[in-house]
Amino acid sequence: MCGIALVVSGCRLDLSSLHVDARAPSPHPVHEHLEFSIDDLKAALRRRGPDSLGEVKVFISSICSNPGEEQQFECFVERVDCGVAFQNQNDQHEMANGRILQSHASCSSPISGAQFCFLGATLQLRGLNPIVQPLMDASRNVLVYNGEIFGGIHVEYHQNDAEALMQALGNCCASNVSLDTNTCVGECKRESTIVDVLSNIQGPWAIIYFADSAKTLWFGRDAFGRRSLLVHWPTVEDSRFLLSSVSPASSMFHDSGHDNDNGTCEVSFWEELPCGIYSISFDARSTDGCLVGEVKRHEWTNESLKELIEWKRTCIVPKPGDISSSYHEDLLSQHESNSACLHNLQSVSEGIQAPVSTPAEILLDALRKSLIRRTSLYTIFQGTTSASRKAELGPVAILFSGGLDSMILAALLDECLDACYEIDLLNVSFDGCSAPDRISAKAGVQELTRIAPLRRWKLVEIDADLSNLTSETKHVMSLINPANTYMDLNIGIALWLASGGDGWIYESIDKDDKFHRRVKYKSQAKILLVGSGADEQCAGYGRHRTKYRQGGWHLLNEEMKLDIQRIWKRNLGRDDRCIADNGKEARFPFLDEDVIHTLLAFPLWEVTNLEKPAGTGDKKILREVAKLLGLHEAGALPKRAIQFGSRIARESNRKNFGSNRAANQASAGSVKFNKHSVLQ
């Protein structure tokens, strides 16, 4: 999909259930109030390369009623993208672009009103017919959706995900749901609620949905935060309620907070919306007649999903002999002591056609299915690309370092993608051919060519010089907002440049493919595979080894659990915004729900063994998967983060701290950047 936003004004929100209060005025005078408009939000969404961008405004006014009578509302809908306003009188119906709009009739004058401005930017990767968001149905419900549905809701081959979701939500008992219990009341007998529908979606998503009959606004993001959704709760300085996939640049450089002595902003206008499902039900219960919205957060209703969120692993501490013996040989002897683990493994293996015997084989099968879901269900080029051009355009690219995770993704993508397509491998370097990631990427292409010689692999070399990226750095600062550390900025710049795909490739100049020349190239792929989630689930970070040495298996498991439960805030929102800004959609195969479930079903010692040195015991199970794919060299590579492998961290340390040594002494990675000095 692409991006969504909502601006709500003219009402008050009751945030007591969330323990969020409108911020008091800054202790220091704010001479320049934050000012950005709906047009600024549109501009930020347009940068994400949508096929369409639409706007719908909904106006709700409470109506004077006689004492004792039920509160009534008048609703007015304006579809801005077609330039025509629709207001219905006397309960009549009108049809606009195939969608029926209707509003309650009343001769009374409104006491107060609220305005909802919905923005929907669509990068359409699925469905035969083009769509324009926001979507509206015959019941006047409004939907903007940024996500993909890989399971949980049936999507027809010809359908777009948002269309299927709109239909599923419309079938819910939206007007007869008790928000406290999420159960149907009254005469409605349907089984699913809105919370049920959203809880069952498999795949990344962020949503804003207005259920008209209940005058309730629903919003949220998936349980792992794979799609960005920022929130601005009303403050004294800006009373609007705002949701957006990305922040306009003005909300970064004219912040509503104040700068402290070192130039960093203590109060951010935007926050990452915590993962979950939220609702705001509106009424006019206040004495002044102002429309008031009560905000609530809802519990997930999918038990399988709740187990993943809670990171429930049955077998954590091995017994003597568990690690030394191979899983295949010791499978039967462990039956009694690890029966619960084996039951989990059997449930994971159900439905697999070929017999499997090792955790690596089970995981490989789950990863393969995850890649298929993310690359093979789309009509990307139908009707837009001739057959002669297919061999020249790759629909899917990979954020590629040549390391373990990206090599596994590349090898699996080769299995899943039609052989006529080339595959772009996007690699960024701030030190030319000397950066570790550039060296390993070139070696990785050689290994991929060995196991898949018929595939045309395109290593896209994206070279960058940090000293020449002033305007780009400023832009990335707004993309990563509210993240504000040097580490976030370094990662953000590297991701933004890499996902742009604007670099160099080597093309053959002779029939025997012996001589090559370096030519400019820009990847046109709309889907970008990213290895996020592999290190968190398989103990790939140095801190995992530290925790293991400090407290053994239990402390290691707790650290891995913490990593998954905070990945939405530390990584995925930031990464999604940086990648989407280039008109690409990030896909995270390692964070597929079935892959997470598969890894949790294994005993922890089958996933990692941190008694062994780096490059061997860490991410043990993924190294075994790599060997099953024939990637023997990649299977022995140590972990290297993008900021270090691309050498942007080194260049940033020199620029902002004078040297790597000074940066290390200052723990530069966690230091908040000075948004003024960093641009000098």
Image (tube, grey):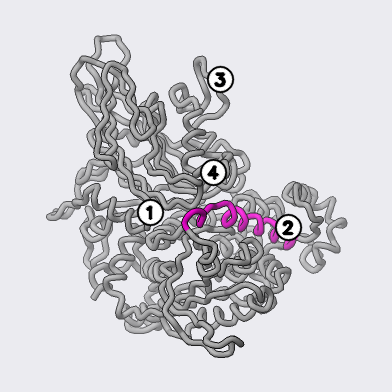
Q: Nearer the viewer, mark 1 or mark 4?
A: 4
406 and 51: which one is in front? Answer: 51
Indicate the position of residue 666 as horizontal and vertical percent values.
37, 75
The quadrant where residue 557 appears: bottom right
Marks 2,3: beta carbons within 8 A: no
Which span of residues is magenta-colored? 359-384
Q: Which residue was labeled with disc 4?
A: 158
> Relative to residue 588, is residue 667 depicted above or below?
below
Q: Which residue was labeled with disc 3?
A: 189
Marks 4/2: CA–CA distance: 32 Å
The residue type indicated by label 2 comes to Ile
Image disc number at residue 142? none
Q: Secondary structure at mark 2?
A: helix
Label 3 environment density (alpha carbons within 10 Å; few <14, some 14–19, many ≥20): few
Q: Nearer the viewer, mark 3 or mark 4?
A: 4
> Relative to residue 195, is residue 399 depicted above or below?
below
Marks 1/4: CA–CA distance: 20 Å
Marks 1,3: beta carbons within 8 A: no
Q: Is residue 241 visible?
A: no
Asked if the stretch drawn in magenta spans residue 362, the answer is yes
Tell me the chief SS of the magenta region: helix
